[in-house]
Structure formats: C-alpha cells, structure tokens
Amino acid sequence: MFALNCQHFTGMGFVTALLLIGYLLCPGLASAQKRDVTSARLFAYQRSLTFDLKETSSKEQDGVIVRDVNYAACDPRHKRIDAYVVRPHGKGRFAGVVFFHWLGNVKSDRTEFLDEAVALAKQGTVSLLIQGYFPWLEEPSEAQNDRRQVIDQTIEVRRAIDLLLSLPQVDSKRIAFVGHDYGAIFGGIVAGLEKRVKTYVLMAGMGNFSDWSLKYWPVTATKGEDIYRQTMSSVDPINYIPRASPATLLFQFSNNDKFISRTTATEYFDAASKPKQIKWYDAIHYLNVEAALKDRREWLTQQIGLAPPK
C-alpha cells in the first residue's frame, strides 16, 4: 500500500484528481475506460468524405416522392450504396428515419420498409432506406475479416445518418432508426455510438454476430469457434447498447422465432439502457403482422413528433 498526499494533485481539477486517485487505487478502472474508448474508436470515420450522390430515378405518388439513389461507400472496396429517399412533396422541417432491412427470403433488401416509409411520409417524415452489403452481398468468412466487415457496415449506417441530416428538409432533432434482423443487430452498435438519433426500433435482433455466422456459414469455425467469438466480441452490439441512453428503445420480438430464442431476445433487451420497451407478437421471425407495424408507427409518431396517421 502507499500513502496519497493531496499535494501531489496541486493544480489539477478536482474531478481529474479524483479520477487519478481512482486509477491508482483501482487499476482495472483505467483499463475498462481505455477499452470503452478503444471500442468507440473502432467505428471512427471521416465525416467530411463526399457522398457523390446520384439519382437513378424519381417518382411521385399521392404527395410522396420516392427517389432511387446511390452514393459512394466510405471504403471503396464496397463500391456504392444503393438507397431510397422517401419524402413528402413540398417544403418543411420533417422528421427523419433511417431504415435497415433484414436478411431473409422475402424483401431481403432496401425494399423491405418501402411501403412503411411511404406511409410515414404522409405523416411528415423523410426516410432513407439503405442496402446492406455484409452479410447480404459479402458473406462471413473468418474472424478478422468479419470483424472488419462489421466495422465497415456500421460506419455506413452512421454515414446514412449523415446523409439524412444533410437533406435540407430534415429536422436534426427528430431522427429515428428502424432495423430488422441484421438491421437490428447493427442498430444496437449504432445506438451506443450515436447521440444524433432520438429513438430506435429494433426488430428480431440479438446481441452478437457469432451465433448466426458459426451456424449458417460453417467456414467461420475453421480456426475454432472460441477464436471467432473472442475476435468478434469487440464489435458485438450487446457491448454497445447499454450506452444508448438518452435515446429511447423499442424492441419487437416474435413468440414463434426459430432463429432467436426467448432467452437470447431477453438478454439483448436486458442489456440495453433505459428508457426502453419490449413487445412480443404471435408471428414468425419476419414479424410481418399488422400489430407490429401499428406499434412501430405509434411509437415513431410519439417519439419524433409526427402528424396523426392519415
């Protein structure tokens, strides 16, 4: 043991001195904070990078404009990101939503939430629906590569928020994120990194990547399942979602989900910061039931201040 002399901290701020004392008495505190900072830095990127936004087509129907666009990925290896921008006709300061789709056998791309985005536009919402590439187009292979892929894909979700906020019609104080399946897994990471998003809706997600990678892409286990899980742990959403506050969180899960057990779902929810809600539905993993859609719409209407549904 050693004696601490207050003279050692002369000229330091009071809080700084207390932190230093804490580090001396409890070295684990310093390493824990270092791990937190390092994990956040994994997903750092240059916000000044240009999007080179290009429009493929645009159509208007019932007062809603749907633009089919693409823009440069942060890392050129992933080429360009396809997306839809869905907005009301006319000027205004509208709420904004980033939608991120699931990996499934029906609408396993940016079209999954297109009808939902059109409906929300009629309530005063600008939506950006992005196309994912990992694991949709670039499949899991081995631990180090997959960790890098998760980092890159998470950065693209953050850049989607950048792009949404760059649109002149969008109110920066009313931003939401909706993700399903892998979209909800990436959403859990983003929730712990971003403070620009007011609320998150996470549908049928879970707290790690390894369970699905090891089961559905067996090549990922070549060097051992433990090595894969350990390598991926630094990017698992269950380590980030506890820092989502002050954002609000709505979790939606299925009672008949063959991919996610109730225990796994509950672990993801329990790890999240408050305020949060969880809802269960008599549905399969797809969650394509009216009750879930209605709850999402009501949640977003309340959380980001939308006009009543028409």
Image (tube, rainbow, N blue to C red):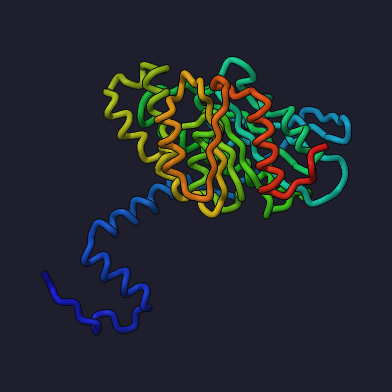
At 72% across and 31% down in the image, what residue appears? 116
Q: Could you say where residue 227 lies in the image, as x and y percent from the top left?
A: 28, 29
Query: Looking at the image, can residue 183 be seen?
Result: no
Quarter holding the N terminus is bottom left
- Residue 127 falls left or right of residue 273: right
Relative to 208, does residue 189 appear above or below in the rendering?
below
- Direction left: furthest residue: 1
Q: Which of 111/258 is in front?
A: 258
- Residue 234 falls left or right of residue 57: left
Q: Could you say where residue 23 lies in the image, as x and y percent from the top left?
A: 26, 64
At 66% across and 48% down in the image, what residue appears? 303
Quarter holding the C terminus is top right
- Residue 139 falls left or right of residue 305: left
Query: Looking at the image, can residue 119 be seen?
Result: yes
Q: Which of 302/68 is in front?
A: 302
Q: Which of 211/75 is in front?
A: 211
Relative to 180, does residue 88 appear above or below in the rendering?
below
At 45% across and 32% down in the image, what residue appears? 265
Q: Which of 144/227 is in front?
A: 227
- Residue 51 falls left or right of residue 236: right
Image-quadrant location for residue 183: top right
Q: Could you say where residue 107 lies in the image, as x and y percent from the top left?
A: 64, 20
Q: Could you say where residue 263 lies in the image, as x and y percent from the top left?
A: 40, 30
